[in-house]
Image: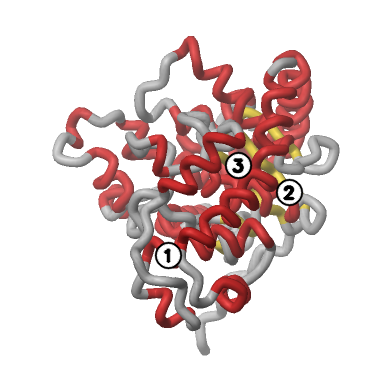
Amino acid sequence: MTDQAPPAYSGPQRVLSGVQPSGALHLGNYLGALVKFARLQHEVETFIFVADMHAITVWQDPKLLAGQVREITAAYLASGLDPKVATIFPQSAVPEHAELAWIFNCVARLGWLDRMTQFKEKSGKHKERSSVGLYTYPVLQAADILLYKATQVPVGDDQRQHLELTRDVAAKFNHDFEVPGYFPLPDAMTQGPGARIMSLRDGAAKMSKSDPSDNSRLNLLDDADTIAQKVRKAKTDPEPLPETLDELKARPEAENLVGIYAALDGRTSAQVLAEFTGQGFGAFKPKLADLAVAKLGPVGDEMRRLMADPAEIDRVLAAGAERARAAAAPTLAEVRKIVGFWGA
């Protein structure tokens, strides 16, 4: 007799993702996440949150944090997310996240967290000075995902290890408490073109809101002149654009700019090369600047309009939090019963 695999999760398909309110959003966030959230909301039930609980794993100014949450929400809305379709909410407004995270802290294993490379990168040589929250961040992330029984999670390369931990937590919970198939083992969603936008100053480094150089990124709130100036100053090499993608791969800054053009224009890098092969960056950069202004300008304008009416953003967040809690509460109630808590 052979061992049979445990029953697979058979509930509804759901997508969940979130962005931390810890700095200005940029082109990488827009292409790698926001526009894809906007598309997904029409394909599958979608939960999108502002990860303010994750943000405070490192110091955040309490006077600024609520405003940063509104700014992320404005970016969601300006990028096409519809609060009547997707559930948009602040993580901290749904206390079930924290309670499920504690339960998962008692399921996850120390060795799993010790292997998390992102903690090692963020804590550096002084991990003893890092917050416990930064260390257990992946467990809270597992709670974020599994609280809504999300089956798919759009993730970048830097989060794939955390998603694997989420799958481990789900599998161990299902096994230890003899509830096979209770939690899904969520899959990573391949984000396709634009998923990894690199710095304008270094084609080997990911575009990041924590980069000390503002010229390394195109912020969503940059005006047209600033966008054009940053594109003109973007690091390149002296050679004209090549004919093939194989040739392009050996030139990281050129590959990045071609990839940005392709993602903004809804084309492949090969199609962009076909148009610009043999041309220098003196010809290519102005076209890229015009395209970036045309695509990002309206997003920034809409964000500024929304941020001028914080009460409206708060209404969106409050309604989303109510919907999120309605989805989260039954899961937590079942989990409390499964683990044997009094009164459950």
Residue extending farthest left: 125
Identity, as a three-letter code, of the amino acid under mark 2 = Ala
Point out residue 312 in the picture as x, y percentages from the top left corner. Answer: 78, 19
Q: Choose the circle earlier in sequence order: 3 or 1.
A: 1
Point out residue 65 in the picture as x, y percentages from the top left corner. Answer: 51, 19
Query: According to the image, label 1 marks what residue?
Result: 254
- Count residues near mark 3 (Cα–Cα under 10 Å), then give few for <14, some for 14-19, many for 20+: some
253 versus 208 height, above or below: below
49 versus 58 height, above or below: below
Residue 311 quadrant: top right
Identity, as a three-letter code, of the amino acid under mark 1 = Ala
- What residue lies at 57% left-to-right and 18% top-to-bottom? 67
Q: Secondary structure at mark 1?
A: helix
Residue extending farthest right: 84
243 versus 200 height, above or below: below
Q: Choose the circle earlier in sequence order: 2 or 1.
A: 2
Q: Which mark is residue 38?
A: 2
Query: According to the image, label 3 marks what residue?
Result: 335
Give the quadrant of the C terminus: top right
Q: Which mark is residue 90?
A: none
Point out residue 76 in the picture as x, y percentages from the top left corner. Answer: 68, 37
Q: Choose the circle earlier in sequence order: 2 or 3.
A: 2
